[in-house]
Image (cartoon, helix red, strand yellow):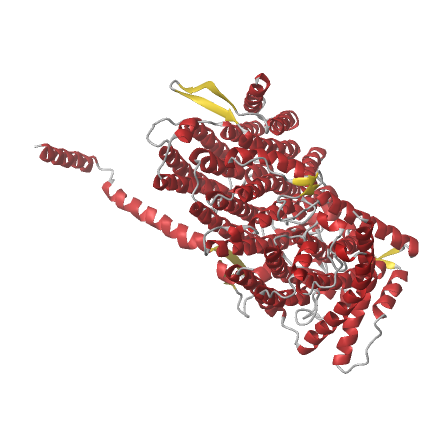
C-alpha cells in the first residue's frame, strides 16, 4: 500500500460522506428548475440533517433493538460501499476485500436491514413499505449483478477498480453490450434510489410510497442517518455507473499525486451532469402504479441479460 | 500409515457408538430425562468427534478396510477418502448442534416414546455415516435403506395425525422409487464383471451409452432424495411433519447424502464425464432453485416455507455440480475446481444455516404451539435468544456478506464468469444466462427470509397468547449458538475451509493443488482474473465504521431517547391485524409469477352471513404429473383386480388354462 493509494482511499470516503447530501440537493434543485419551481438551496439536505441530529429521538413502544441498530448498520454499509467503489482512484487498498459481487451483496444487506426495521414496529405502513421494497429489490439486485457481470466479462475481472481501468484504456473501442447494460443500469439506479417512476421521494401518499413508508417511525438522529445513507446510496450508484460507463478521469498510478488533484474536479463534473440527467428523467416520466414496477424492473433485468448475450455473440 | 488407518476405525467406532446410544434409549423408554439429558448430549459428543476426525483426516491418504459383518460372501467394504471426510465433517458438525438442541427439545407426550425416538434418531445418524463410508454397492444400499426407513419412522412420530401419515407414505414411496433407480445404476456400473465393490466399478470400462444410462439412473435416484423438481413433492410434506430437530437433520444433512452419492458416482465411479450431462444437471438445478424459492415465498406455514427453501438450495448445489461436469467434460480443470468447491461449500453452508432455521422454528413451535405464520409475530421481545440466532441463519441463507451463504454464491458466480470460454457455440452463450437465474434466486431468497423473519419475530404479536411465549431453554440455546457460530465461522474464514475442500477437488478432478489466496484472510481463487473477497476485512471495516458512527453521534450531539406510541402517519387505532400477513407479504411474488402457481380462491358473495375468504396455492407438478400418474396406477390396479376375484373356482380355472397352454406349447 503506497501513501498515495492510502490518501486516495481516505479522500474518497470523506468526499463521499460529505458530498453525497449536496448531490441529492443538486438533483432536487435541477428538478425544481425543470418544473418551474423556485429551487431550494443545494445545501438544504445539510440543514435538514443538522436539525434532525439536534432533536430528541422518539422510539415507538414496540421497537426492538433491531430497529435502533439498523440506521447505524445501513449508514456503515454505505460508507464501506463508498470505500470500495473507484470514484477517484483505481488503486484502492480496501477494494481488494470486496469485488463487484460483494458490493451487490453489501447493498442487499442494507436493503434487508431497512426492510426488517420497517416491519419491527408492526404498523400497516411499515410492512407495506417493506414488502414493496423487497419487491423492487428482488428484480433490481439481479439486474445490477448482470450489469456488473457483463463489465466483468469484458474486462476479465470482477474487481471494480480493475474494471474501471480496463474500460478506460479502450477509449476508442465500442462495446455494444454496454449500451444495453447502460439502459439496464439507469433503470436500476432509479428504482433502487426510490426515484420516479418507481417511487416518489417527495410524497407521503400511501398509494405510492415505498422508501418513505419504511422510514415513517424513525425520528431525529436515526432518521438523519437513514437519510444520509439514502443520499450516499444515490452517490454510490452514480459512482458505480461512472466506473462502468464513463471511467475516464479516475487516477491511475502513472499520474501520481497530480492525477488525484485532477480526479476531484472530474468527479464533480460527472456528478453535476449525472444529477441533472436524473432530474430530467424524473421530470419527463410519470409515476408508475406499484404493480407496474415489476414490469419496469423486469425490463431492466432483460436488458442486462440481453447485454450479456450481445457480449457473448459479438465477443470483445 | 498406522495413524491413518486409525481414522477410519475411529469413524466406525463413533458410528457404532451412535448405535449403542440409540439402543441404550430402550433401557428406560419412558424417561425423557434419561434419553434427552443424558443420551442426546452423548450423541452430540460423538458428532463433534466425527467432525474433528473428518477435518483432521481430509488431507490424509485413502484408507480402506473390510468389516466382518453382512452376508457370508458379501462383507461390508468401507473406505475413507477426502470426499467422505468432508461430508463426515458436515454430518458431525451439524448433528452436534442439532443433538444438543434436541436434548432440550423433546418433551413428554410428543407422539412416540422418548426411548424409541432416541433409537430411531441415532440409527438415522449412524446410517448416514455408513452411507458416506460404504465402498461397495451392497453396504451402500443397506445403509441407504436404513437411512430412509429410520427417517420414515421419525417423520411419522406423530402418526395419529392423518396428514402426517400421508406425508410419511409419500416420502417412503418416492424414497423407494429413488432407491430402485440407484440400485439399477449400480447394476449398470459393474459393467459385466458382476463384482459390486466400488473398486470393481472404478476399474470397469463402460461405453459412453451405458455410462450415460448409469448417470441418468443415478441422477433420478439421488435427485429423488435431494428433492429436485419434479421429484420434490415429498419434501414440503415430509420435512414439516417431522419434529423440528429431525426436520433440521433431514434438510441439513440427509439431502446432502444425495449430493455425496452423486459426486461419488459421477467423478469417482464413472471417472470419464460427458459435458452434455452437465447441461441436464444444470437445467434441473436451475429449475429446482427457481421453483423452490418462488414457492417458499408464498407459503404460510413456517416449516413448509423452510422445506421449499431447501429445494431451492439443493437446486443451487446441483447447479454448481452441473457446472463442474460441464467444465470437467471440456477439459477446463481449474474452473471445474472452482465450481466443485462452490458446490461443496454450499453443502456445508446449507447444512448449518438450515439447521439454525429449523431449530429456531422448533423453539417457536414449543413456545407458542403455532406453525402458521399468520398467528405469530413480535417474538423478538419474548424470545430474544432464538430471534437473534435465527436472524443470523436467515441473513446467511439470504446470501448476505459477511456470512457463509455469500461465500458459496460468490464462488458459483465466479465460476459462471468462465462459462463464455466453453468451446461449444450456443452452450457458451446459454451458460452465463444460468448466472442470471442464480442471481434472481438469491435475491428472491432474501425476500423469503425477510418475510420469514419479519412475520415471525418482528411487529406486534398477532395473537394474545403470544405474550406468554418463553425463550428457549439452555440446551436449545447452546445448540442454536453452535450452529449459528458455524455460519459465522464459515463466512469469515473461507480460505481455511477451501484449502481443505481443495483436497476433494484433487481427488475427484485429479487437478493439481489450487492457489486460493494471496493472504490468509483474502480469498482469490483465480490469479488471472484478479477477483478477491476478504470477508474478515469487510466485516471489521463495517463494524469499525458503525462503532465510530455511534460514538461520533453521541459525542457531537447527544444520545437522548424517549419512548412513545407509534406514529404511523397519525393513525391512532393501530392494531396487530393491520400488519402484513404471510399471504400479504407473499402477494407480489404470487402476482408476478402467477403462471407458475395453481391458485384457487374461495370468495364470499356479498350476501354471506359469515363471509369466508380462502385461497390456496398449489403445485402444477403435483396436479399435472403425480395425480395422472396415480390415476393410471389405480386404474391398472383395478384391471388386475378383475383377475383377482377371490373365488377358488376361478383360480382353479386359471391354473387349468395355464396348464393346457403350457402343454400346447411343449407338445
Q: Is residue B278 above or below residue B67?
A: below
Q: Position of residue B202 (x, y in %)?
A: 42, 30
Q: Residue furthest left?
A: B667
Q: Residue B52 vs residue B423: left or right?
A: right
What residue appears at the point 49 percent right and 56 percent down from the top-left corner?
B430
In the rendered image, the residue lying farthest to the bottom is A36
Q: In front here: A48 or A23? A: A23
Q: Quadrant of the N terminus of chain B?
A: top right
- Given residues A142 and B397, the one toward you in this image is A142
Determine which quarter of the picture holds residue B623.
Answer: bottom left
Q: Residue at x 78, y 73 (%)?
A: A28
* Residue at image coords 68%, 70%: A208
Residue B334 place in picture, x, y as percent:
55, 42
The answer to whether B411 appears left or right of B635 in the picture is: right
| A4 up-or-down from B487: above or below | below
Which quadrant is home to the C terminus of chain B? top left
Q: Position of residue A16 (x, y in %)?
A: 80, 60
Would you say B478 lies left or right of B232 here?
Answer: right
From this viewpoint, is residue A218 visible? Answer: no
Can residue A2 be seen here? The reply is yes
On screen, residue A223 versus residue B297, left or right, reads right
Q: How many marks?
A: 0
| Nearer-the-camera pick, B443 or B614 | B443
Residue B524 spot, x, y in % from top left: 65, 44
Amino acid at each position: 500500500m503506497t501513501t498515495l493509494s492510502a490518501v486516495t482511499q481516505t479522500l474518497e470516503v470523506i468526499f463521499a460522506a460529505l458530498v453525497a447530501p449536496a448531490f441529492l440537493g443538486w438533483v432536487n434543485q435541477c428538478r425544481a428548475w425543470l418544473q418551474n419551481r423556485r429551487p431550494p438551496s443545494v445545501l438544504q439536505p445539510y440543514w435538514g440533517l443538522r436539525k434532525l441530529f439536534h432533536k430528541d429521538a422518539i422510539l415507538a413502544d414496540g421497537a426492538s433493538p433491531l430497529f435502533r441498530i439498523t440506521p447505524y448498520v445501513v449508514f456503515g454499509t454505505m460508507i464501506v460501499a463508498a470505500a470500495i467503489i473507484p470514484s477517484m482512484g483505481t488503486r484502492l487498498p480496501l477494494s481488494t476485500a470486496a469485488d463487484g459481487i460483494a458490493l451487490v451483496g453489501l447493498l442487499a444487506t442494507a436493503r434487508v436491514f431497512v426492510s426488517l426495521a420497517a416491519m419491527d414496529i408492526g404498523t400497516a405502513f411499515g410492512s407495506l413499505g417493506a414488502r414493496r421494497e423487497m419487491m423492487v429489490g428482488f428484480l433490481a439486485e439481479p439486474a445490477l449483478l448482470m450489469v456488473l457481470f457483463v463489465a466483468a466479462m469484458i474486462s476479465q475481472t470482477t474487481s471494480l477498480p480493475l474494471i474501471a481501468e480496463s474500460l478506460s484504456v479502450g477509449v476508442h473501442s465500442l462495446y455494444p453490450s454496454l449500451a444495453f447494460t447502460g439502459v439496464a443500469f439507469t433503470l436500476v439506479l432509479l428504482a433502487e434510489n426510490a426515484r420516479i417512476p418507481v417511487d416518489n421521494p417527495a410524497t407521503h401518499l400511501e398509494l405510492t410510497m415505498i422508501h418513505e413508508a419504511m422510514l415513517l417511525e424513525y425520528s431525529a438522529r436515526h432518521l438523519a442517518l437513514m437519510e444520509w445513507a439514502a443520499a450516499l446510496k444515490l452517490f454510490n450508484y452514480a459512482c458505480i455507473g461512472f466506473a462502468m460507463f464513463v471511467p475516464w478521469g479516475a487516477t491511475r498510478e502513472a499520474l501520481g499525486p497530480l492525477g488525484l488533484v485532477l480526479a476531484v474536479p472530474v468527479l464533480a463534473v460527472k456528478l453535476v451532469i449525472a444529477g441533472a440527467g436524473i432530474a430530467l428523467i424524473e421530470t419527463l416520466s410519470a409515476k408508475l402504479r406499484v404493480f407496474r414496477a415489476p414490469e419496469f424492473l423486469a425490463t431492466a433485468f432483460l436488458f442486462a441479460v440481453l447485454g450479456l448475450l450481445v457480449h457473448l455473440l459479438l465477443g470483445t | 500409515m498406522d495413524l491413518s488407518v486409525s481414522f477410519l476405525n475411529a469413524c466406525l467406532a463413533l458410528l457404532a457408538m451412535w448405535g449403542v446410544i440409540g439402543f441404550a434409549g430402550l433401557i428406560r423408554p419412558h424417561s425423557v430425562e434419561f434419553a434427552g439429558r443424558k443420551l442426546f448430549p452423548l450423541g452430540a459428543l460423538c458428532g463433534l468427534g466425527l467432525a474433528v476426525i473428518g477435518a483432521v483426516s481430509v488431507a490424509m491418504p485413502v484408507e480402506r478396510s473390510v468389516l466382518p459383518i453382512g452376508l457370508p460372501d458379501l462383507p461390508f467394504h468401507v473406505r475413507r477418502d477426502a470426499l467422505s471426510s468432508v461430508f463426515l465433517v458436515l454430518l458431525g458438525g451439524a448433528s452436534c448442534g442439532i443433538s444438543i438442541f434436541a436434548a432440550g427439545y423433546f418433551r413428554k407426550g410428543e407422539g412416540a416414546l422418548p426411548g424409541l425416538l432416541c433409537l430411531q434418531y441415532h440409527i438415522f445418524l449412524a446410517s448416514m455415516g455408513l452411507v458416506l463410508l460404504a465402498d461397495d454397492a451392497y453396504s451402500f444400499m443397506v445403509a441407504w435403506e436404513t437411512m430412509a426407513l429410520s427417517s420414515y419412522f421419525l417423520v411419522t412420530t406423530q402418526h395419529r395425525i392423518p396428514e402426517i401419515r400421508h406425508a410419511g407414505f409419500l416420502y417412503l414411496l418416492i424414497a423407494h422409487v429413488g432407491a430402485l433407480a440407484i440400485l439399477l445404476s449400480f447394476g449398470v456400473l459393474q459393467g459385466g464383471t458382476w463384482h459390486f465393490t466400488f473398486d470393481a466399478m472404478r476399474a470397469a470400462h463402460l461405453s459412453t451409452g451405458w455410462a450415460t444410462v448409469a448417470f441418468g439412473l443415478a441422477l433420478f435416484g439421488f435427485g429423488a432424495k435431494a428433492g429436485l423438481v419434479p421429484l420434490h413433492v415429498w419434501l414440503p410434506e415430509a420435512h414439516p411433519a417431522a419434529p423440528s430437530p429431525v426436520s433440521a437433520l433431514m434438510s441439513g444433512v440427509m439431502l446432502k447424502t444425495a449430493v455425496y452419492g452423486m459426486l461419488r458416482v459421477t467423478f469417482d465411479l464413472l471417472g470419464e464425464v460427458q459435458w452434455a450431462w452437465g447441461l441436464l444437471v444444470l437445467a434441473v438445478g436451475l429449475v429446482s432453485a427457481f421453483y423452490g424459492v418462488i414457492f417458499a415465498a408464498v407459503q404460510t406455514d413456517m416449516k413448509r416455507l423452510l422445506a421449499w427453501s431447501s429445494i431451492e438450495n439443493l437446486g443451487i448445489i446441483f447447479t454448481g455440480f452441473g457446472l463442474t461436469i460441464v467444465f470437467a467434460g471440456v477439459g477446463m480443470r481449474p474452473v471445474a475446481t472452482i465450481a466443485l468447491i462452490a458446490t461443496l461449500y454450499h453443502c456445508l453452508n446449507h447444512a448449518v444455516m438450515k439447521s439454525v432455521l429449523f431449530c429456531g422454528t422448533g423453539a417457536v413451535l414449543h413456545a407458542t404451539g403455532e406453525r402458521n405464520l399468520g398467528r405469530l409475530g413480535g417474538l423478538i421481545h419474548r424470545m430474544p435468544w432464538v430471534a437473534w440466532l435465527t436472524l443470523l441463519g436467515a441473513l446467511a441463507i439470504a446470501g448476505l456478506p459477511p456470512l457463509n451463504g455469500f461465500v458459496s454464491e460468490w464462488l458459483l458466480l465466479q465460476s459462471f464468469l468462465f462459462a463464455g470460454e466453453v468451446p461449444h457455440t450456443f452452450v457458451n452463450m446459454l451458460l452465463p444466462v444460468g448466472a442470471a437465474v442464480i442471481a434472481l434466486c438469491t435475491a428472491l431468497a432474501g425476500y423469503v427470509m425477510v418475510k420469514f423473519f419479519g412475520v415471525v419475530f418482528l411487529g406486534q404479536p398477532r395473537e394474545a397468547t403470544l405474550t406468554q411465549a418463553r425463550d428457549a431453554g439452555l440446551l436449545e440455546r447452546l445448540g442454536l449458538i453452535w450452529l449459528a457460530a458455524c455460519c459465522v465461522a464459515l463466512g469469515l474464514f473461507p480460505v481455511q475451509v477451501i484449502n481443505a475442500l481443495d483436497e476433494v477437488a484433487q481427488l475427484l478432478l485429479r487437478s493439481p493443488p489450487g492457489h486460493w489466496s494471496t493472504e490468509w484472510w483474502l480469498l482469490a481463487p483465480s490469479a488471472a482474473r484478479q477477483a478477491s473477497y476478504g470477508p474478515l476485512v469487510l466485516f471489521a471495516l463495517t463494524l469499525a465504521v458503525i462503532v465510530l458512527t455511534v460514538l461520533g453521534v453521541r459525542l457531537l450531539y447527544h444520545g437522548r431517547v424517549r419512548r412513545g406510541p407509534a406514529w404511523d402517519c397519525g393513525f391512532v387505532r393501530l392494531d396487530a391485524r393491520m400488519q402484513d400477513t404471510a399471504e400479504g407479504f407473499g402477494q407480489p411474488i404470487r402476482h408476478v409469477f402467477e403462471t407458475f402457481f395453481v391458485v384457487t380462491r374461495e370468495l364470499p358473495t356479498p350476501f354471506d352471513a359469515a363471509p369466508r375468504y380462502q385461497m390456496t396455492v398449489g403445485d402444477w407438478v403435483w396436479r399435472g404429473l403425480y395425480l395422472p400418474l396415480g390415476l393410471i396406477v389405480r386404474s391398472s390396479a383395478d384391471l388386475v383386480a378383475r383377475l383377482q376375484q377371490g373365488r377358488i373356482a376361478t383360480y382353479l380355472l386359471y391354473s387349468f388354462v395355464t396348464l393346457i397352454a403350457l402343454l400346447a406349447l411343449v407338445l
